[in-house]
Structures are given as C-alpha cells and as structure tokens.
Image (cartoon, rainbow, N blue to C red):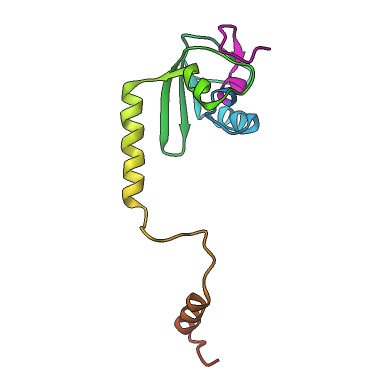
Amino acid sequence: MSTTMDTAPVRIDKWLWAARLVKTRALAVDALRGGRVKLNGAPAKPSKDVKPGDEIEFSQGVIRITARINGTAERRLPASAAQQLYTETEDSRTERERRIAEMKMTRPQGVDRNARPTKRDRRQFEKLRGRDEY
C-alpha cells in the first residue's frame, strides 16, 4: 500500500475516502449502495476498482460533483494531496458553486439552530403558550 498518488487500481470506496469526498469508508459504502455514486455513467458497487482516466459522479444532498480521476491512493492523504487525485469538470464546479450560493441565500440570517434557548427565550415561549402566570 502506498501513501502517495499512484496509478494502480483501487476499490472505489477506498478512493472516495482517500480523496476526502467522504469522512469514513462506511459512509462511502452507504453512498455507493444508495446509488449516489456513478463510475463512467453506471452505478458502482463498493468493490469496483477505479483507475486514472475514469469519470466519477458523486451526489451529496443537492450537491453533485462530476470529476475525472487523476490518480489513486490506498490511504487517506492530506487535503492538499487529496485534491490532486481528481479534477472536477468546469460544468460541475459552476453548478456546485451556484447551488451553494443559493443555499446561503435561503438560509435564515442570525439564527443559530444549535444554540440553547436563553432564559429570556424560555419566558417568551411560556408567554406564547399561555403559561405566564408564574
């Protein structure tokens, strides 16, 4: 197993993980089994080998990436090296950037969904529910 970019065929689930398109190999397998990854236009199974020159389509939510594989790697590489494993097509890049900008425009501003309600927020909720007798 080499840790640098190679030309030998590698399983597609390992490649997706090494190229940092997914966080774990388990997520790569889920994406492959869910039909969100196509290799050369056909749905791919986790054990399918990829090699330089292959074209991959990867969907994650509303984001779709179409790329040509430049190299392979058995192990996860640093982000800068992982970007060298594939070249995203220009159409894919512009569509992806457009969708990301669209999502940013529709997102509510100033709302942190992960923040815990403050004491003031709780009082307002209680008042709306009609429980402000306390």
Q: Which residue range is magenta in the image?
A: 1-16
Percent across and percent down for residue 56 are 47, 19
| 8 drawn magenta | yes
Query: Which residue is nearer to you in this view: 67 or 4?
Result: 4
Image position of 32 with respect to 49: above or below: below
Residue 84 appears at what percent x and percent y? 48, 18
Q: Residue at x 50, y 9 (%)?
A: 52
Most distant residue in the bottom direction: 133
Q: Quadrant of the C terminus?
A: bottom right
The residue positioned 34% from the left and 39% from the top of the image is 99
Q: Residue furthest right?
A: 1
Q: Nearer the viewer, residue 78 or 19?
A: 78
Residue at screen point 54% across, 28% down: 20
Q: What is the number of callouts on the image?
A: 0
Residue at the spot 52% in from the left edge and 70% down from the top edge: 117
* Residue 65 vs residue 120, the one in the foreground: 120
Instruction: Please tell me in which quadrant of the rendered image residue 1 appears.
Output: top right
Q: Is residue 83 magenta?
A: no
Relative horizontal placement of residue 75, taking residue 84 as reference (left or right) = right
- Give the percent coordinates (x, y) of residue 24: 62, 32
Quadrant hosting residue 95:
top left
Q: Is residue 60 left or right of residue 24?
A: left
Left or right of 9? Residue 91 is left
